[in-house]
Every structure is written in structure tokens, then in C-alpha cells.
Amino acid sequence: MSIREELANTTLAFTSAEEKIVQVLLADYPMSGLGTATRLARRAGVSDPSVTRLMTKLGYVGFADFQARLLTEVESRLHSPLLMMEAKRPGGSSEGTALAYFHSVSDSLERTRTAVPLQAYTRAVNLLLETKGQVVLLGGRFSRHIASMLAGYLLQFRSGVRDIGSLSPADFDLLIDLGKRDLLVVFDYRRYQSDVVSFAQQAHERGVSVLLFTDIWLSPIADIADLTMVAAIDANSPFDTLATAVAQMETVFAHALEGHGAGVRKRIEDIEKIRSANAVTLDAAEPASSDDTGPSKPAHKSRAEKK
């Protein structure tokens, strides 16, 4: 759990001065905690000893201990594959690199399962299906593919779905048509993309609701998101895994099917009719004719047979 999550979800009882410090830390996270204790105290309008007492109550040896962990967290958010190539060199595992990788992804998947409460999946489904306006989907360099998968699922449940795909400067013009009736769904995992963050922030300023899928270090979009879905993405590789992000996205739709499947059945039936009419899938193709005495006859003769 990140420091931000600990501060937001703690059950500790704070004094009024300590509450002010926590509010400052959360309002400008993580930057507010990267200065001195005196600077933090001044921003919160409290005394320096109040900062020290808060850190002790949170379980840190002092402000320096708190800041050291915060710096580690910030560094983790900014790790590139190049940096992680040094940090995650394959070890001499007896099970081999491939199996070790699978096990690391499995561990992340288990942590993803418990990263957010079940109620969050219900809220995500409600946002996706009950939004009256458009549902716009956006992702980063790799996570945009998950956004496109989500759009494909969502189109079977409702209309008004728009997948931006790879964000371009021209796509910022789409903001003009977004407002309070709309929902922006964003997939943003470390290293977070500045253009994706900027688009989400500007959409939020226009009153658009924001559903964020991110990692345990939290995209900056978490500061303005109406709901944040967290997935563990670390794996035994220089590259983070998105398998857990895909699983979490598909879990949202498994949850949607359980509660809304009957309501969208007619729409899915109509989609299937359209697919069948256009022979979109193999099962929609006309079966070849056959008789009782032999195999199916080909529909067309080959050139050799025509001669």
C-alpha cells in the first residue's frame, strides 16, 4: 500500500493539527512531503513538533524515515525498463526464467485480487453502464490496447462508446464535446504519460467523471479520479506485466454480466444477427452441401477441373 493510500484509509485518530498536515500531504501528493518538516508545517499552519508527532503516530521513526520511504515510492513510479534491467537481472533460479516469470505474475495477480474492495467493481460497473452521455476510453503507449479491449466489451452493453486509441494533439479537440454527463475511462501505469494525464485533468475540469485503472504507485490522475482501480503490475522482468490489468478489466465485465446480463441480452442478440448477416465469424458461414454417400462438394471448381 502506498503512503497516500495509508493516509487516506487510516483509522487512526488525529488531532486537528495532524489532520491539517494529512490534508496538505494528500492535496499535493507526493511533492508536499519532499521538502523539509518545517516547510510542511508552515504549509499546514501548524508547529514543527506537530509534524514529528504525526510521523511517530503513523509508525515512522521520524520525518526523515517517512521521507525516505516516500522517495523510494517516487523512484519506483519513475522506473524505466532500462533502470529495471539492472535491478531485475535474471537470477539463477532452479525452475528457470520462464517459470519464475509466471510465478511472479501469479503473485501480482493475487495481490491485484485484494487491492481494491468488491464494492469498487460495483461502482465501476455503474459508471460504465449508467453514464447517460459518452464513455470515452484512453490509455498510454501499451495500456491503450487494454482500453480498446474494454471498448469492445462495452459496445456489447451500451451505445455511446468512443475509443480514442493512440492520443494525438488533434484528439484534445474532443474535450469541447465532453461534459458532466460523460465518463472518461483511463488506463495509466508507470511510467505515466504526460499527455494522458493532461487530457484527464482537462476533462475533469469540464465536469467529466473519471474512472482510472492504474498501478499501486498511482498515476497522478488518481488525484482527480472519481474511482481508482489498482492493479499490481510488477513481475520478474525489466518490463511490468499488464496481464493483471487485463484480468482486472475483464473482472469488471464479469461483474457487469452477473448484475446486468439480462438487461443487455436484446442488444447482444441484435449484434449477433448483424454479425450473422455479414458472415463476420466462421460460425456464421453457410455449411457446405453434402449427400449421404460422400464428403461435401466444393462450391467452385478449380481451374484444372474447368479445362
Image (cartoon, grey):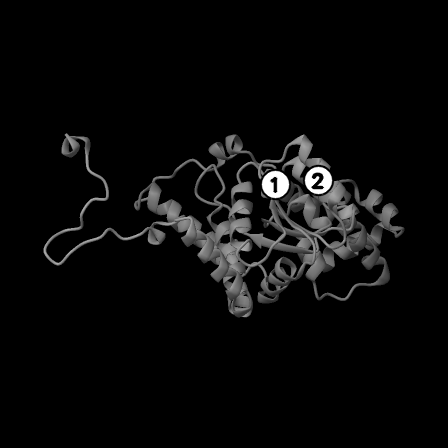
Direction right: furthest residue: 45
Image point (12%, 58%), residue name: 292
Residue 58 in sight here: no
Residue 35 in sight here: yes
Q: Which mark is residue 174?
A: 2
Quadrant containing the N terminus is bottom right
Q: Distance between the residues labelled 1 and 2?
A: 9 Å
Give the number of marks. Answer: 2
**Label 1 residue SS:** loop
Amino acid on which disc 2 is placed:
Leu
Residue 276 in the image: state x and y as whole percent. 41, 54
Density class for disc 1 (Cα within 10 Å; few <14, some 14-19, many ≥20) is some
Image point (61%, 41%), residue name: 164
In the rendered structure, the answer to whether residue 285 lies left or right of residue 14 reads left
In the rendered structure, the answer to whether residue 118 lies left or right of residue 209 reads left
In the rendered structure, the answer to whether residue 24 lies left or right of residue 299 reads right
Quadrant containing the C terminus is top left
Q: Which of 17 and 152 is in front in this view?
A: 152
Task: Specify the quadrant of the image occupied by residue 58.
Answer: bottom right
Amino acid on which disc 1 is placed:
Ile
- Vertical side of 257 occupied by 221: above or below: above
Residue 268 in the image: state x and y as whole percent. 49, 60
Residue 183 in the image: state x and y as whole percent. 68, 52
Direction left: furthest residue: 293
Q: Residue 164 carries which label?
A: 1
Are the two marked residues, 1 and 2, in contact with CB atoms closer than 8 angstroms? yes
